[in-house]
Image (cartoon, rainbow, N blue to C red):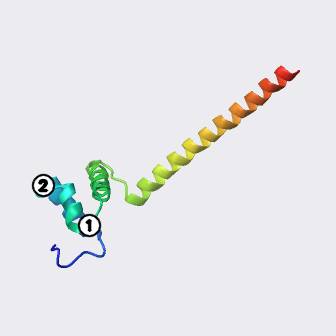
Amino acid sequence: MSDDNPIKRWTAKRKAAVVMDIFKGKTTTAEVARQYDLTVSEVEGWIDEAQRSMENGFKARPKDIREQYESELRETKEALGEAHLQIYALKKFKRLLDEDENS
């Protein structure tokens, strides 16, 4: 990949090649960001994504990406629902205390 031909679209294959070069010590995150006019956080995001994918690949029964995201979304929705119920209960408890004080 040369500087003469700037990359307009980062395919999964191109991202993987760059991340592998970083993993192998051929380049650094900062060098990649500078070379391709990216932010360091963009490149770090690619690295994080690659590490998550690798971890899934080493599992005895790897999940496909869609299943993995759906599972994470389900867990997030459950946590949000629990938080909502806690807030509702606390507000109701506060109203009851306020009513007791005013009686």
- The quadrant of the image that shows the C terminus is top right
Of 57 and 19, the residue lying toward us: 19
Q: Residue at x 78, y 30 (%)?
A: 95
Q: Position of residue 70 (x, y in %)?
A: 47, 55
Of 22 and 2, the residue lying toward us: 2
Q: Position of residue 99 (x, y in %)?
A: 84, 26
Q: Quadrant of residue 11?
A: bottom left
Q: Residue furthest bottom?
A: 5
Q: Position of residue 93 (x, y in %)?
A: 74, 28
In the figure, is residue 91 to the left or right of 47?
right
Q: Residue at x 18, y 59 (%)?
A: 31
Sequence order check: which comes first, mark 1 or mark 2? 2
Looking at the picture, which amino acid does disc 2 mark?
Lys
In the figure, is residue 80 to the left or right of 60?
right
| Residue holding disc 2 | 24
> In this picture, is 38 found above or below 7?
above
- Circle 2 Cα neighbour tier, 10 Å, few/some/many (<14 / 14–19 / ≥20): few
- Circle 1 Cα neighbour tier, 10 Å, few/some/many (<14 / 14–19 / ≥20): few
Q: Are marks 1 and 2 in contact (CB under 8 Å)?
A: no
Element at label 2: loop
| Residue holding disc 1 | 37
Q: Quadrant of residue 101?
A: top right
In the figure, is residue 102 to the left or right of 69?
right
Of 59 and 2, the residue lying toward us: 2
Element at label 1: loop
Q: CA distance from mark 1 to mark 2?
A: 21 Å
Looking at the picture, which amino acid does disc 1 mark?
Asp
